[in-house]
Image (cartoon, rainbow, N blue to C red):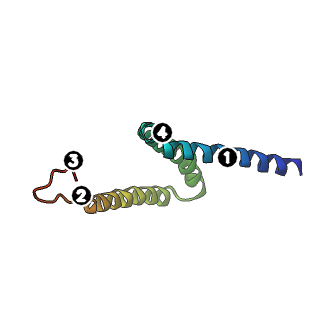
Amino acid sequence: MANYLDIIIFSLIGSVFSLVGGIVLLLRKKWADRLAKYGMSLSAGALLAAVFLDLLPDGLDAANAETVLTACLAGVVMFFFAERFLHWFHHHHQHEGKDPQLG
């Protein structure tokens, strides 16, 4: 029972710190922009490390290597094209005769 109580307490502490950090970043845009610059690279690296060092070897142990690697390649290609497609539709309109900095 004590283990469950420890989990609940530490989860609440982590949630409070996350909430306070989120509020601080909402109030301090300059800090949020600076943190996002480095946080995006850190999270992408952590995700790639988890996939290639933990999940992919486990998948290769559990199933046929050709199936696992084909699924991995299909996922990479699918997200590449999804990003290209979504980026293609993301554009900003510029009205004639208006200075883009003045709005």
* First in residue order: circle 3 vs circle 4: 4
Q: Residues within 10 Å of mark 4 (few under 14, many from 20)?
A: few
Give x and y (percent) for residue 39. Answer: 47, 40
Q: Nearer the viewer, mark 4 or mark 2?
A: 2
Residue annotated with mark 1: 16
Give x and y (percent) for residue 46. Answer: 51, 42
Residue closer to the observer: 65 or 23: 23
Q: Secondary structure at mark 1?
A: helix
Q: Residue at x 15, y 60 (%)?
A: 95
Q: Residue at x 32, y 61 (%)?
A: 86
Indicate the amino acid at tag 2. Answer: His
Indicate the amino acid at tag 3. Answer: Gln
* First in residue order: circle 1 vs circle 3: 1
Give x and y (percent) for residue 76. Answer: 39, 55
User: Can you say whether 78 is above or below 6 in the image?
Assistant: below
Q: Residue at x 89, y 52 (%)?
A: 1
User: Rounded to the nearest whole Å, what is the CA distance between mark 1 and mark 3?
Assistant: 39 Å
Which label sits on residue 101? Answer: 3
Indicate the amino acid at tag 1. Answer: Val
Q: Nearer the viewer, mark 3 or mark 4?
A: 3
Q: Residues within 10 Å of mark 1 (few under 14, many from 20)?
A: few
Residue annotated with mark 4: 42
Residue closer to the observer: 3 or 28: 28
Q: Secondary structure at mark 3?
A: loop
Q: Residue at x 81, y 46 (%)?
A: 6
Residue closer to the observer: 95 or 36: 95
Indicate the amino acid at tag 4. Answer: Leu
Marks 4/2 in contact by CB < 8 Å: the verdict is: no
User: Rounded to the nearest whole Å, what is the CA distance between mark 3 and mark 4?
Assistant: 32 Å
